[in-house]
Image (tube, rainbow, N blue to C red):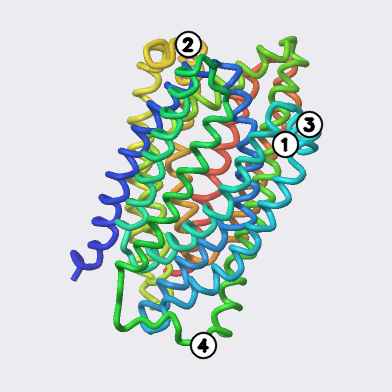
Amino acid sequence: MKKTNRHPLIIGTLILTATGLLSRIIGFFYRIYLSRLFGEEGMGIYQLLNPVLSLSFSLTAAGYQTAISKLVAERAATDRSRSYQPLIAGLSISLPLSLLCNGVIYFFADPIACRLLGEPRTAMMLKILSFSIPLSAVHSCINGYFYGIKKAGYPAAAQLVEQIVRVASVYIAAGYCFAIGREPAIGVAVLGLTIGEFFSMLVSFASIALCKDKAVSPLRISGYRSVYLPLMQTALPLTANRIVLNFLQSIESVSIPARLRMYGYDNTTALSVYGVLTGMAMPLIFFPNALTNSIAVLLLPIISESYALGDLGKVRSAALRTVKYCGLMGIVCMLGFLFLGKWAGNFLFDSALAGHFITTLGFICPFLYLDTTLSSILQGLGMAGHIFVMNVLSLLIRLGFVFLAVPTYGITGYLWGILASQLTQSVLYLLCLNRFLKRAK
């Protein structure tokens, strides 16, 4: 029985990890390709789009994907015939929101670029990016359904297709520009992102058609009213959480180049340093997170299902085992980055600055990888409000370092802030989980 209980998590984690690692390998070399194609300043401009993309995803999809996964897992455990209902309900809310967001960003791209991002060259890229938002919302909701029924292979396939199509699109478009004697613009990378999202959505629709279950009736109307209330009760706090967090992250992202200029850099140097940190060093630090992300995504429905069935022993066992192994993995990765960080920066990106960032950021690995899974466990236990408060506190610490330390110490001040915030977040997560487990016991 014990082996059977672990089976969905182990198999699902292996599937997601294998495809996640493959996607990250492709994405990693893609980052190297982009850095060599567009340079450090180009990467800095490209990274300025992240706040807009993150805020849009938070508003339209992130909370609904998690809520769908949680509700589908609970319904599949008690009444499989209604497991489609959270997906349909989630799509009916997420898709209109994403289309509205698409229109706002497209028609107000110029003021967003100039006044919010402080870089007029991002205006056209924002218009292209806006069309990826509805596509992302649809396939995120469908992914939530598959995570809920513990069929990780379908979202994994969509993720892999998205990455392959994105890279291929940029490579073909850049090759065409060179063929006609023109230098490719950084907007080519945004076009590739949007095309990748489109094909990912197509794969998600195909997955729904392939994954047929006679016991499930998506057209069964009765009972849909009872879905919206628990869906919104789960999704709204998560959405508010993500919006506030991404709003704070957006302030952080936009403020870093500005504070670096206060430190003494010109605009080109500030964007270049920002591009090296966020476009080269941090993707390498996050590379091993493919494993912890896979575990986190699949832990949520398993924790939710076990908690709904009153199996607190399984909740406790999964939580303790996750903390132990993710913490161990973080320590191993930290040592690897500390000893090989400078070499990796020079060899992979031809940048000594990237090597310095990688070595310094290596210290956050034990906390970073642990936080990913702890957050998922706490969400599965219905503690979204606690997560929100702890994440806001962590971000405020980082923002404090951006505004107070960066003008004096440069980008090093921001690296100190990242370490302090991740450490604080880990301690708070562990205290919260420990308190819950003691009460449950």
Distance from the alpha carbon under mark 3 to that under mark 4: 48 Å
Q: Position of residue 148 (x, y in %)?
A: 39, 67
Dot placed on the residue nearer the N-terminal end, 2 or 1: 1
Q: Are marks 2 and 1 in contact (CB under 8 Å)?
A: no
Q: Residues within 10 Å of mark 3 (few under 14, many from 20)?
A: some
Identify the mark at residue 351; answer none if there is no mark: 2
Q: Residues within 10 Å of mark 4 (few under 14, many from 20)?
A: few
Residue type at mark 3 is Cys
Q: Mark 4 falls on what kind of element?
A: loop
In terms of sequence position, does the residue under pointer 3 or pointer 4 come before the other? 3
Which of pointers 4 and 2 lies earlier in the amino acid sequence? 4
Q: Position of residue 349 (x, y in %)?
A: 43, 15
Label 3 or label 2, whichever comes before in sequence order: 3
Q: Which residue is mark 4?
A: 223
Q: Secondary structure at mark 3?
A: helix
Residue highlighted by disc 1: 251
Query: In the depicted view, which residue is nearer to us: 126 or 229?
Result: 126
In the image, what residue type sits under mark 2? Ser
Closest to the camera, between mark 4 and mark 1, is 4
Q: Amino acid at mark 4?
A: Gly
